[in-house]
């Protein structure tokens, strides 16, 4: 009898909690849309970009295919408000979505332009984000004459603040916090970077150091709140990285500063985990794998269940094969006369490799500084300069060489851009990229100084030339 009573009580308690108003079912969330024009079916990805440590390692929430008319539809399983990235071959767009939203959007396939339209529950958030996205955009502000920029900035930041203030009565606390974070992030980014951006166009604007420092301090204070905002988190991470990055410091010294500064922020475990993983992934790409080994060991011990462990292990093993002191992977390419080039043909010499393309503006900006480096070492027979173009269209590369002939440099083409042989062998996902190979055919630097660094590159090449060749 006692067992029967206990069983009945258990059932009654279960029914009570099942029927309790607090036990609400998570509302269904929908996202659909259409791209104009649509020439083919493409895959649409939803990414949790605020948690990603690198664009090349996406965290997918969902995916679907558009039909031939560019239409797509998704039923999302989300339990809390979040920023997501809608990514496809058409565009990449940031969206803030909450459980229960049913959003329909239309886009012209260009991430730089606003949505054509949006409707349904939650769509007003997308339209509002589109509106504020252009207020402090560097491209938009560049259109104004330098004497009018400051007045426009004051006008636009005030408009931004009014939008955020007015939104408080119309939206959820989660979205209001997201808007306030966006305002602070965009304001700090504009104040800190716009004057640098305009310098590229020979326009010199004053820099408000005091305001920049104040906004940075406000961001650091806000960072103690758990906020899923990709650009905001990237700014905090970059501010820490800048404290650690000094050319006079070794990689070990930089790593220690970076680790200590992240911990000093006093953030949540999940955010600290994210920043450390992001930084360690970056330092792995420097090729000095031995320097980061103890930090990776400590990381895995501190965060045994981290979602980033597999990525860090994969990258560690990959970079270890092309770390400093490892034999450089051989690769082939072709000269302008179509004859074959092999890296191994220059064994016994120090090789400075410049990976570039005619479409890469930063690469072309290094041409003039590179000529000065070549002249400095013109009498050095044990040093070879190899320019490897990854241009996919060989004719464009050949025409460029005819218009810009360079002496004492080996020019070869390895087509395919970031799918070229050298890009795959040396894990190149951005150019220009510079590599130094020593006389034994081993990697001296997988991420060498660029020509515009001047004396820093000269010192690095002299160190490589002075390296004694070991005896077999």
Image: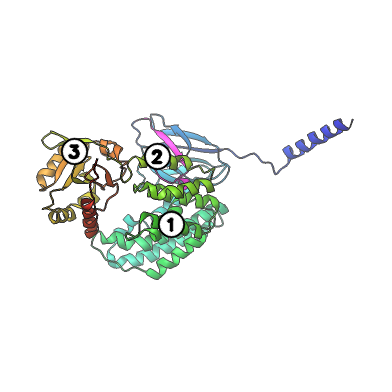
Q: Secondary structure at mark 2?
A: helix
Q: Quadrant of residue 202?
A: bottom left
| C-alpha distance separating marks 1 and 2 | 22 Å
Is 235 drawn above or below residue 126 in the view shown?
Answer: below
The stretch of residues the image draws in magenta is 40-59
Is 383 drawn above or below residue 248 in the view shown?
Answer: above
| C-alpha distance separating marks 3 and 2 | 29 Å
Q: Quadrant of the N terminus?
A: top right
Give the x, y percent position of residue 20: 73, 41
Read off the residue under disc 2.
Answer: 317
Q: Residues within 10 Å of mark 1 (few under 14, many from 20)?
A: few
Foreground label between 3 and 2: 2
Give the x, y percent position of residue 383: 16, 48
Name which residue lies at 39% across and 50% down. Answer: 291
Residue 469 shows up from this direction: yes
Q: Secondary structure at mark 1?
A: helix
Is 237 drawn above or below residue 343 in the view shown?
Answer: below
Between disc 3 and disc 2, whose residue precedes?
2
Q: Which one is in front, 350 or 38? A: 350
Q: Residues within 10 Å of mark 3 (few under 14, many from 20)?
A: many
Residue 323 lies in the magenta stretch: no
Q: Which mark is residue 256?
A: 1
Residue 418 shows up from this direction: no
């Amino acid at each position: 009898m006692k067992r029967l009573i206990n069983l009945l009580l258990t059932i009654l308690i279960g029914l009570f909690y099942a029927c309790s108003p607090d036990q609400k079912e998570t509302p269904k969330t929908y996202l659909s849309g259409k791209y104009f024009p649509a020439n083919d079916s493409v895959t649409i990805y939803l990414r949790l970009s605020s948690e990603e440590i690198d664009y090349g390692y996406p965290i997918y929430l969902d995916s679907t295919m558009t039909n031939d008319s560019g239409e797509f539809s998704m039923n999302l399983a989300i339990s809390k408000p979040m920023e997501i990235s809608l990514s496809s071959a058409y565009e990449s767009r940031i969206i803030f979505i909450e459980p229960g939203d049913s959003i329909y959007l239309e886009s012209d396939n260009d991430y730089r332009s606003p949505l054509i339209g949006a409707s349904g529950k939650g769509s007003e958030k997308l339209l509002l984000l589109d509106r504020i996205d252009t207020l402090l955009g560097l491209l938009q502000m560049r259109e104004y004459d330098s004497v009018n920029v400051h007045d426009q900035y004051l006008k636009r930041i005030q408009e931004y603040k009014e939008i955020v203030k007015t939104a408080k009565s119309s939206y959820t606390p989660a979205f209001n916090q997201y808007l306030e974070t966006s305002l602070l992030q965009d304001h700090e980014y504009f104040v800190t970077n716009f004057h640098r951006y305009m310098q590229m166009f020979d326009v010199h604007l004053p820099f408000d150091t005091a305001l920049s420092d104040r906004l940075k301090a406000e961001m650091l204070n806000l960072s103690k709140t758990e906020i899923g905002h990709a650009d905001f988190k990237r700014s905090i991470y970059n501010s820490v990285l800048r404290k650690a990055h000094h050319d006079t410091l070794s990689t070990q010294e930089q790593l220690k500063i970076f680790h200590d500064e992240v911990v000093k922020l006093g953030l949540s475990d999940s955010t600290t985990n994210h920043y450390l993983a992001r930084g360690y992934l970056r330092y792995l790409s420097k090729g000095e794998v031995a320097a980061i080994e103890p930090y990776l060991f400590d990381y895995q011990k501190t965060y045994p269940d981290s979602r980033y462990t597999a990525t860090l292990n994969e990258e560690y093993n990959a970079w270890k094969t092309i770390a400093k002191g490892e034999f450089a992977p051989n690769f082939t390419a072709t000269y302008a006369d179509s004859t074959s080039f092999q890296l191994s043909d220059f064994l016994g010499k120090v090789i400075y490799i410049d990976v570039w393309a005619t479409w890469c503006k930063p690469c072309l900006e290094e041409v003039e500084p590179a000529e000065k480096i070549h002249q400095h070492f013109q009498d050095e027979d044990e040093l070879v300069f190899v320019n490897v173009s990854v241009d996919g269209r060989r004719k464009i590369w050949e025409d460029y060489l005819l218009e810009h002939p360079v002496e004492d440099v080996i020019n070869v083409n390895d087509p395919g851009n970031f799918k070229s042989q050298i890009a795959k062998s040396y894990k190149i996902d951005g150019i220009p990229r510079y590599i130094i190979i020593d006389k034994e055919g081993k990697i001296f630097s997988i991420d060498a100084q660029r020509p515009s660094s001047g004396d820093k590159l000269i010192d690095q090449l002299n160190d490589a030339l002075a390296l004694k060749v070991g005896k077999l």
